[in-house]
Amino acid sequence: MKQQIDAYLNHLAVERGFSGNTIMAYRNDLYSLQKHLESDGPSDWRRVTPDHLADFVLVLQEKGYSETTRARKTAAVRSFFAFLVDDRTIENSPAVELSSPKIGRSLPTALTEDEVVRLLDAPMAVDTPESRRDKAMLELLYATGMRVTELVSLKVADVNLSGGFVRCIGKGNKERLIPFHEQAIDALEFYIEEGRESFLGRRQKEQALFLNRRGEQLTRQGFWLILKEYARKAGIASPVTPHTLRHSFATHMLRGGASLRQVQEFLGHASIASTQIYTHLTDDHMREQFEEAHPRGR
């Protein structure tokens, strides 16, 4: 994979006359994509799909890269795959519809409470070990607001069902304890007692909480695909990503009366400024309620 990246960088230098600084930035961007794919995906550019690239962009967001940096990295990815098409390495670019963050203050998208209910209930249309696992994952993600990387990294020992809390290791290796509600406890208990064992096979010593069919820790990309399918089954028209549930958790908590400081601690934000973006959404909700209730607002 590195060979194609180096060929592209040479193309930028020789044929397009890019500056050394720009080429170095593109090199770092594409090497980080290569590293991401090799750790959690294909090792051949011909096998890369739009979902692989969307997962890469999601990881950049989780790592806290600025919108400007993510936009540049996205542009580098799109340009690289266009080069691979021109070079006939691949037939079609998987990056054609890869969205780039808009530069400026972006507001998170949250699901409505009705959409969340439909999404969380979607796995139980059938009763299989996979549906029990998926129900537990969705319930826990919405109950805690964890990042998807934190969710799939959980060990069985990190969940305290009797106490109703989960031990989460976030950015900077910082630990936080997040409480979760009875419905999430029930879903997790059902999965651990009635579903997880069927995935283990010979891997009885596996400590990861959420497993794939091979008995290995479920990946971010694996969860992304699962979530997309349930969003489709739930009839949710807007795009749903793992971060959507995190945003929905924060928004619904604030609308329900939780303090900004509490939500900051649950989300694991180092600065409360990162959490304050949600106040705009709750202000909009308050205005809607005011206009519905006030005689002159109707």
Image: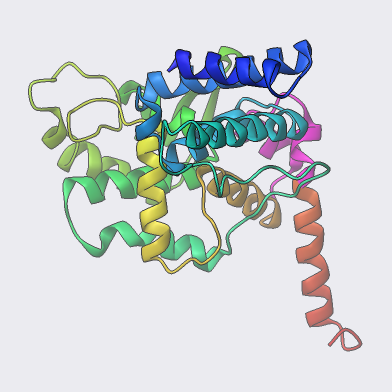
> Percent from the top left, x then y, of residue 88?
43, 34
> Percent from the top left, x then y, of residue 160?
37, 29
Q: Residue at x 18, y 35 (%)?
A: 213
Residue 202 in the image: above or below residue 240:
above
Q: Quadrant of residue 223?
A: top left
Outermost residue on the front side: it is 15
Residue 276 colored in magenta in the image = yes
Left or right for 16, reference 199: right
Closer to the camera in the image, 181 or 77: 77
Residue 297 in the image: above or below residue 13:
below
Q: Is residue 154 visible?
A: no
Q: Quadrant of residue 204?
A: top left
The chosen color scheme is rainbow
Closer to the camera in the image, 187 or 50: 50
Q: Residue at x 43, y 32 (%)?
A: 151
> Percent from the top left, x then y, of residue 44?
36, 25
Q: Quadrant of residue 289?
A: bottom right
Residue 42 colored in magenta in the image = no
Outermost residue on the right side: it is 296
> Percent from the top left, x then y, of residue 224?
42, 42
Position of the C terminus, as image quadrant, is bottom right
Left or right for 249, reference 50: right
Q: Residue at x 76, y 56 (%)?
A: 281
Magenta region's main secondary structure?
helix
Q: How many marks?
A: 0
Q: Which residues are magenta?
A: 258-277
Q: Is residue 278 visible?
A: yes
